Structures are given as C-alpha cells and as structure tokens.
Image: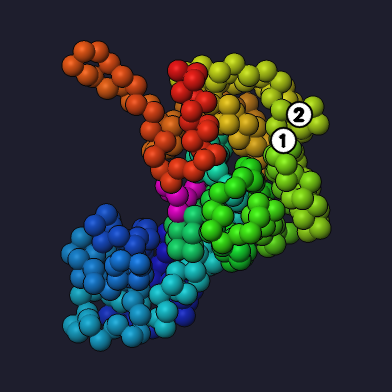
Amino acid sequence: LWTGEKIIEAVDGRTVGGVAGDLEGVSIDSRTIRPGELFIAIRGDRFDGHDFVARAFENGAGAAIVSEREVHRFDPAPGPLVVVGDVMVALAALGQAARDRATGRIIGVTGSVGKTGTKEALRVALGKSGTTHASVASFNNHWGVPLSLARMPPDTEFGVFEMGMNAPGEIAALTVLVRPEVAIITTIAPVHLAFFRTVEDIADAKAEIFESMQPGGAAILNVDNAHFARLAAKAEERGLNVVSFGESESAMARARRVTLHPDCSCVAADILGIEVTYKLGTPGRHLVLNSLAVLAAAKLVGADLAKAAMALAELKPPEGRGAQFELKLPHGRATLLDESYNANPVSMRAAIELLGQL
C-alpha cells in the first residue's frame, strides 16, 4: 500500500529508526492492527493514540506516525517512527496523497439519511465490474475520510467515500480531499439541526460536496425531495450535470414498479434510458429509492449496469440499520428489527414502515 519513503514524503515527516520495507495497511487502532501496517497515533475525544504506540508495535505494526510534541515519550523507540508536527494534519496529507495517485473513478456520498447503506450498495454493485474500495462502517468524518483514502490501493478502479457533517463547512473540508467526479445526495431532512437554523441550511451544507468537483461531473439528486431544485441549482453553478432519481415521471433513474417484501424488494426501473429489473436484498421503500441512485452512479462511472443490478440481491443491512433477527422465546419466536445506530425521526419512520411490511 505504501513504502516508507512515500509516507515520509506525503506527511513531510522525519524518521526515528528509519522506515524500511512496504507497509500493507493503515490503522488507528492498536487492538486490531495487522502485521506490517502503519499505526497513526491520533488524539480522540477519549483516547490519545500515543498511549498505544508500544502496543501497536507489539501487535506487529511496521511503523507509526507520532507527534513531535510526544516523541520524547519513545526513548528508545519501540519501532520505526515518522515524526510530524501534527498527526491529524499528517493523516489528511496521507489521504490527499492517496487521492492524488488514484487513477480510478471516485464517488462521494452524503445526505441526511441513507449514506452508509448507499455506500455499501455501491461497494457491492461496483465490485462486480472492477477493484472497488469503500470506507468501512461509518468512517465519514474529519478522521474517517482521510483514513479511508489512505487505505485505498493505487490500483483501485472504483472508490466510494461517505461524507457526513454536524455543522457548516465540514463537508467542504472533506470534499477537498475526496474530489469526487460523481456525488450522490440521498435526501435532505431535519436531521442534525443542532447547528442549523433551517432545513434549507442543511441542504446548503450537503451541497458543499460539489465545491471541489470538476465541471462535467455528475450530481445525483432525489427529485422527490422538497429541496431538489435548491441542490440542482447549486450543482449547475459548479458546471455539474444533474442526474435525478426517484419515483416521479421526470426522474432520470426512475422506479417504474416496486414490490415490497419482508426480506427484500423487487424493482423494475429505468436507469438513464435502460430498462432494469432487479432484486434488492434489503427491504424497505427508502432503500429502493437509494438503489436507483446507486445504479445511476454505476452507469456514469462505466460499470456494467446489468452486473451492478444483479449484485444488489446480495446486499445486507448494515449493523444497526434495519437488520432483522429471529429470537427464540419461551413460548414462541419474535423478530427483532434493529434500527439502533444513530437513529433519528426520519430513519425511525422508515423502520416503522418496514415493521408494517413484516
């Protein structure tokens, strides 16, 4: 994934003990790091990665990035160190270097709800057409996005990155790193209102994803959302092509017929002029709508649309986002519908609708 030389060059650091050989991955968790990976000692809200550098080396780390302010703690050094002025700045620089060397097609995903599910659907759908790299879990913030970029192999053909925010300006900072050529905004809803006066302000913050895109890129937007026109105008100001999805007749990626089942959905759709019939492995009308955006993106980046549509049958709900579990009880069985991850009124409405289907 990285050579020591390329890491030092990317983060503008100095070495203690030298960094020899190749590094096969990038990690911020000493507990799960694999042999030969680079450990980045970031400081979080509760933990300081510098406290776990020694453990990372015990578990096989090939090198570690540490702060100049903390390097005095490592005498003698437990392994090869790359010393930088600011570890978070170094992480962003490493992510930027990974993006700079990338030759594949890059997709960014944001929205008030449905980001992670859409990102996972893209990973599954695009994976049938080429080497695909996507951020894990919900790594969509100021450290998750550059970490996901830093983990992207140079030969990646399709890269998918989720971008989230709690306040204005956060997505703008992330999209500078990702520089997507296709951006999906799943929907706009009254979520994360703590730092916003209105839902329109949320729409404007999500539209920051367009700011580092090159003219000629594509913005895939939900035409059934009340803020579609606002988002489309901002995309067009950047010289982007607007691709609409939804159930409306005007949608460029449109669901013609949807059959909802307790454990899946069956869809007949028109994706940019191509008729597609497919099964979606996760149930729920809201996921059907997002799958239209996924297939539109797949078509735009040159993936095989038929293979992408077929792959969606393999999709499973992410943890805490609609997974179903059968529980054995003393006097029968029950189904647990798990919608516990960072739930909000919009996702709960979708969960209750799904409960109705069951």
Residue 262 on image: x %, y %? 47, 18
Picture quadrant of residue 244: top right
Q: Residue at x 43, y 72 (%)?
A: 88
Does the magenta run of residues contain 136? yes
Structural distance between the alpha carbons of marks 2 and 1: 7 Å
Helix or strand or loop: what does disc 2 sit on?
loop
Residue type at mark 2 is: Ser
In this view, 131 is above or below 17: above
Helix or strand or loop: what does disc 1 sit on?
loop
100 or 188, which is in the foreground? 188
Q: Residues within 10 Å of mark 1 (few under 14, many from 20)?
A: some
Residue type at mark 1 is: Asp
What quarter of the picture does the C terminus occupy? top left
Write down the residue under mark 1.
224
Horizontal side, residue 148 vs residue 241: left or right: left
Residue 149 on image: x %, y %? 50, 58
Q: Which residues are magenta?
A: 133-139
For the question of whether residue 100 can be seen, the reply is no
Q: Residue at x 24, y 72 (%)?
A: 51
